[in-house]
Amino acid sequence: MTAATEYSLAELCIVAAAEAFRDDGEKLATGIGVIPRLGASLAMKTFNPDLMMTDSEAFMLSEPNPLGDRGADFAQANESWMGFSRIFDNVWSGKRHAMLGPTQIDRFGQTNTSALGGTYQQPKVMMLGARGFPGNSICHRNSFFVPAHNDRVFIDGECDFVSSIGYNPARLPKGRALSDVDIHRVITNLCVMDFGGPDHQLRLLSLHPGVGVEEVLENTGFAIVVPDEVPTTAAPTEEQLAIIAALDPHNQRAYQIKDNPPGVRG
């Protein structure tokens, strides 16, 4: 497959997000947000056809739905019914991989989707809430997408409100171990990372084209592991770009990263 020479940063991140689902096999893939969803869909359409995906309502699909208005003649590829009880069976058994975008991530991999500043009773900003994230984070694999990598997201200290389990022994539920936590990938507009460093420290895996190590370090509020050699994030192939365009016919991906920059910095 031929690597593309022109692509957007959003498309680069979609391909990096797809790679996060490569080795999952038959797991329920949940991409929350445009880039995570397109990443999961691209993985299902290419190297991991065993991925399971729903229509976000009640049906399992054999083909991922495109984003946006699909027209009156569109017929989604229903494979089976997937009600709430079956969803929870997948969650509790670890047969799910979700990718979402937290507002804060700390050095433990704990995240915040709930509140910023002040106290929880009187926060400066109230957000979505923890919702199902505490149970999801301890029961199955999770990955994160961050469209603006900075030290307001990757914060010094602990999250203002801890919405999900991370590699923090002090917050583990009774009977649980750090080995139960599976934070698989962290994809940002600068790089790809994981928590595979010593003592589950955040580790740099690849840099997007034109991004330097120092920029990542300056925009991360805590220390991260930098290997001696850091590869460049793989560019999309022409085939992948064609699949992404078909999955996103209204080009919603162009609005996910500020100013929709190119994938290769000038």
Image (cartoon, helix red, strand yellow):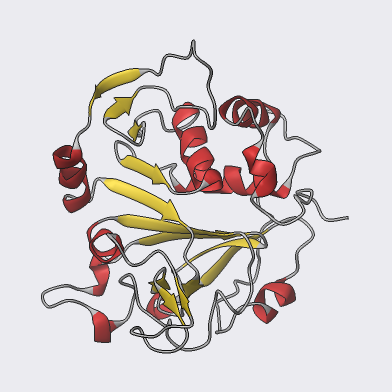
| Viewer can see residue 184 | yes
Q: Nearer the viewer, residue 205 or 29?
A: 29
Q: Where does the image place residue 136, in percent across and percent down from the top left?
A: 27, 58
Asked whether, in this view, residue 26 is left or right of residue 241, the answer is: left
Which residue lies at the image location 32% right of the left edge and 81% below the top edge?
168
Q: Nearer the viewer, residue 226 or 175?
A: 175
Q: Where does the image place residue 28, in percent across and percent down from the top left?
A: 31, 40
Write down the quadrant of residue 142 in the picture.
bottom left
Q: Nearer the viewer, residue 39 or 199?
A: 39
Quadrant that contains the C terminus: bottom right
Write down the quadrant of residue 31 in the picture.
top left
Whether 224 is drawn above or below 22: the answer is below
| Viewer can see residue 24 | no
The outermost residue toward the front is: 122
Asked whether, in this view, residue 137 is left or right of residue 201, the answer is: left
State how many labels appear.
0
Whether 21 is drawn above or below 111: the answer is above
Whether 196 is drawn above or below 124: the answer is above
Which residue lies at the image location 40% right of the left edge and 28% below the top edge?
49
The outermost residue toward the right is: 266
Which residue lies at the image location 42% right of the left edge and 85% below the top edge?
158
Q: Where does the image place residue 248, in percent across and percent down from the top left?
A: 60, 31
Q: Nearer the viewer, residue 120 or 22?
A: 120
Quadrant that contains the N terminus: top right
Q: Where does the image place residue 104, in percent across and percent down from the top left?
A: 49, 73
Which residue lies at the image location 68% right of the left edge and 33% below the top edge?
237
